[in-house]
Structure formats: structure tokens, C-alpha cells
Image (cartoon, rainbow, N blue to C red):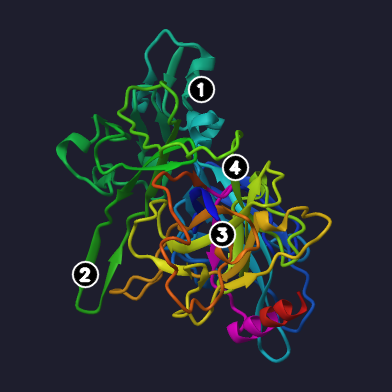
Amino acid sequence: MWLLQSVLLCFSLSLALSGQRELEAPAYPGVLHCGLRSFQFTVNLRQETATPPALIAWDNRGMPRRLQNDSDCGTWVREGQGSSVVLEASYSSCYVTQWDSHYIMPVGVERTDAAGHRTVTKMKLLECPMDFLALNAPSADLCDSVPVWDRLTCAPSPVTQGDCKERGCCYNSEVNSCYYGNTVTSRCTQDGHFSIAVSRNVTSPPLLLNSVHLAFRNDSECNPVMATHAFALFRFPFTSCGTTRRVTGDQAVYENELVATRDVRTWSHGSITRDSIFRFQVSCSYSVSSNAFPVNVQVFTLPPPLPETQPGPLTLELRIAKDKHYISYYNVSDYPVVKLLQDPIYVEVSILHRTDPDLGLMLHQCWATPSTNPLHQPQWPLLVKGCPYTGDSYQTQLIPVQKALDLPFPSHYQRFSIFTFSFVDSVAKRAFKGPVYLHCSASVCQPAGTPPCMITCPVTRRRRSSDIRFQNSTASISSKGPMILLQATKDSSEKLHKYSSELEEA
């Protein structure tokens, strides 16, 4: 037996969200409107039991919460026409997060049966673009409501109406002026800067503009570059003021956050405030291969894979199947895929574009981290030396690949399933908010089906160094998108029993 290739595979699971698409549960009809400051989602809730259904969302720990009127969390629920319910959620709501330059919020319908058991029956992912304000000129009321003496210039004259609207600003054709509206106007500049104009009238009651600051840095260089009694204008580079950077695919995403400090009055029997809540998250995305702005962007690439013994490329793919039958798989447009915690995920790794029946694919180590870096801590093992990690109460399940008409070369495939989970802070004992990534080390060998090309579980002896030889170079491969992991309300033991039954039937 000889080794053709050693490959590192990386697959991402994420708490981050994207795309207005339906989740794993059956579709629920509804109408979503993306406003300047909030989602507005109207859905018809048919009452089929004595207890009315309720809308729920998931907090930053992935726990389900029933939605109600809550100004602190920025959610409002009211009755609509017929049996419909109207949900409004501020973009700064406790349940709204960001993914790929979008505000996103998963919502569900929770029903209670006669025995009092609560179950999430329907789910939907709400999505609105983060650059909605910048890509759309403010409405007439947001422009006309700015007194002439309060208008802050958005672009110097002369300026065309098209250029002004492209900046997300208001245009006055009579005097050919471009000015900011009574909202928050954010823009990503070509020279690598954030430009954010905040109107005091973006909230009610009006903001105290001198309390608005960047959440992560409050240095003098991060103060507004211009401030009036009606507006505060922030402008700072992506490389300062606490801006974070992450790379998603070929996109470098820069993120920061503006917040306002509230004046809280306290006495012996309690505390009050009369100030509005303000939290504004801004994100700019650029292609890492583009030269659109002169920011120092470092792209670390892995060395190319070693050549195989016969000419031709060697390509591996990691896919997620929609169910245990491995008939249909999630495409790029399906991501992010939303799963409840403890739901099974069906993973498949395969060799592409090869017709040699002697090739065999072997998975060695698989583990999870909260970042794209496979060396990031903490880590959680899934496969150890090709076998399920025994320290997990929900062990990874190896799924044999049987000979079938749709798989002419079964030895080119490896399949396994895991239960979804989230990392927990060992100190605070709270679930991490953020992405979870799955990594696998794999090798290709031949002849397939012989003992040196097979892994028997449990591992009974240490494999001799002459059996498997690893080469130093590795390549990387990722899934087509992230997954969202949410806490289920149904009993976990019931779900585990159901899943075990499915495996027995498979």
C-alpha cells in the first residue's frame, strides 16, 4: 500500500446567520419587510390546539425565548388582521446578529400539546441587508424633517442626485445640496474607512450625541470628526478603533459597533433612565483578491497538494446531506442551514473526478473548533484515529458506504454523523456565541479494501510506521457555508431515541 495524498479538510458550523430562507422545519408563510431600523414580519398563526401558538427567537446562547413587547430587547408583537401576528424587531435587538453583511434573526413557532409539552413546529430565518441604509436613499420624511440650519453636508457641491443617493443621503434639487437624513447613514469608503453619520433623531426620545461612542475603543482618534447639536460624524480606518476582521470565503469583513451611554439615576429603592437605547453595528466587506483599497490584507495560503503517481488533479469534497439517505445535499444557496442542538448532521467526504477503483479514502482525525483555524482552542474531538471519540456521550456514528448504482466507487466515500453542539466557556459556563468549525485530516491510499487501507474500530494496536506514511504538504477544503445551532424545546432524550431508531432503520 502506498499513500497518494494527505489532505486536511475543514467544514464550518456557525451560529452566525444568513439568507432569508426556510429552515429544516416545514415552511411557514409570512411576509418580511426590511425597514430602515427594523424587521417587520407578518405571519398567520393558525390555532389548532387549546393553547395559542407563540413566536419564539433564540438568544445569544442559543436558548429559545418567547417573543413579547420588550423595549430593552427591541421586540414588539401585536395582532394583525385575522389570525396573523406582526413582529417588529430592531436591528439592535437581543435576538438579531450579523452574517455576511446582513442582519439576521431566526424565529420559530412554538406549540403546546394537551399534555403541556412544548415543541418548535415551524421556523424561518429573517434577513435584511446591513447596507440597506447606504444602498437606499432615506425616505422623504427622514429628509424633510431635517431643518435647513441643522443639515450636515454629506458630499460637497457640485454633486449629482445619483451620486448623493448612492451615498445614502438626501438631495435638495433647489440648491443642489447633499445632506444626511434623520437616521444612521453608514458607508464603506474605497480608501478603507468607515463613515458613519448619526442623527440625534434616530431614536425617540432623541439621542444624547455626546454619549455616542465606539464600543471597543474610546480613544481621542476614535471620536467624531465632526459634531453638531443634531449630528455626529465618525470616520476611522478599518485598522483602528477596535475594528475586528474576519475572512469568510474570499471576503474580508471588517466590523465595529457604535453605542450610546444612558444616564441612569439611582436612589435607595431603584434606578431609572430616560435615555433611548442605541446600538448600531456596521460591517464592510471586500474581496481579498481585490485592489479596491490600500489596506494591508494578508492572505495565508496553504502549499499546493503533492502530485499523485498518475497525472491528473486530485480533488476532495465535503458535503452535508439533508437526511440519512444521502440522496440530496445542501447547495451554496441553502446556507446557512439551521439545526436544533442535538440534531444529527450527516457528513460525507469524497474523492472527485477519479475513476480508479483501487483508490481508497481514509479519515484519520476529525475535530471541532470555534474558528477557521484548526489549531484554535478550545477543541472537541469527533474522530480519533478514524474511530468515534469515546469521551462524548453523543458519539460520532460511522456510516458504512454500501455498493449502490449511484456510487460506482464506494471506496471513494466516507460518511459519518454527529449531533450538533455548541462550545461552552469553561469559566462562565455559558455557550459561546459564534461559528463552530469542523476539521478532518484525510489520506488517499491503495489498494482499497486491503487491511492497510482500512481502519477497524476500536483501535486495538498502534499502527506501525511502515503501514501508513504521511507526506508533509496538506491542502484545505471547506463546506459551502455555515450552520446555525439553536436550542430545542422538545425533550432531548426523545430526540435521541428517534435518531437511534433512524440509524437502525438505515
Q: Secondary structure at mark 3?
A: strand
**Where does label 3 land, which residue?**
362
* Residue 166, numbered circle: 1
Q: CA distance from mark 4 to mark 2?
A: 64 Å
Q: Secondary structure at mark 1?
A: helix
Judged left or right of residue 292, residue 404 is right
Q: Nearer the viewer, residue 213 or 263?
A: 213
| Relative vertical location of residue 483 with respect to residue 178 in this rendering, above or below | below
| Mark 1 or 4, closer to the camera | 4
Amino acid type indicated by mark 1 = Glu
Amino acid type indicated by mark 4 = Thr
Q: Secondary structure at mark 2?
A: strand
Q: Which residues are magenta?
A: 478-498
Sequence-earlier tag: 3 or 1 = 1
Q: Position of residue 186 (x, y in %)?
A: 41, 34
Judged left or right of residue 181, residue 414 is right
**Where does label 2 land, which residue?**
266
Contact (Cβ within 8 Å) of mark 1 with mark 2: no
Sequence-earlier tag: 4 or 2 = 2
Contact (Cβ within 8 Å) of mark 3 with mark 4: no
| Relative vertical location of residue 48 with respect to residue 26 in this rendering, above or below | below
Sequence-earlier tag: 3 or 4 = 4
Q: CA distance from mark 3 to mark 4?
A: 14 Å
**Where does label 4 land, which residue?**
315
| Mark 4 or 2, closer to the camera | 4
Amino acid type indicated by mark 2 = Thr
Q: Is residue 211 magenta?
A: no
| Residue drawn at the location 56% of the way across and 57% of the way down | 483
Crowd tier of the residue under label 4, counting other residues whose Cα lies within 10 Å: few below 14, some 14–19, many 20 or above: some
| Relative vertical location of residue 436 with respect to residue 417 in this rendering, above or below | above
Would you identify the image quadrant in which residue 1 lies? bottom right
Q: CA distance from mark 1 to mark 2?
A: 45 Å
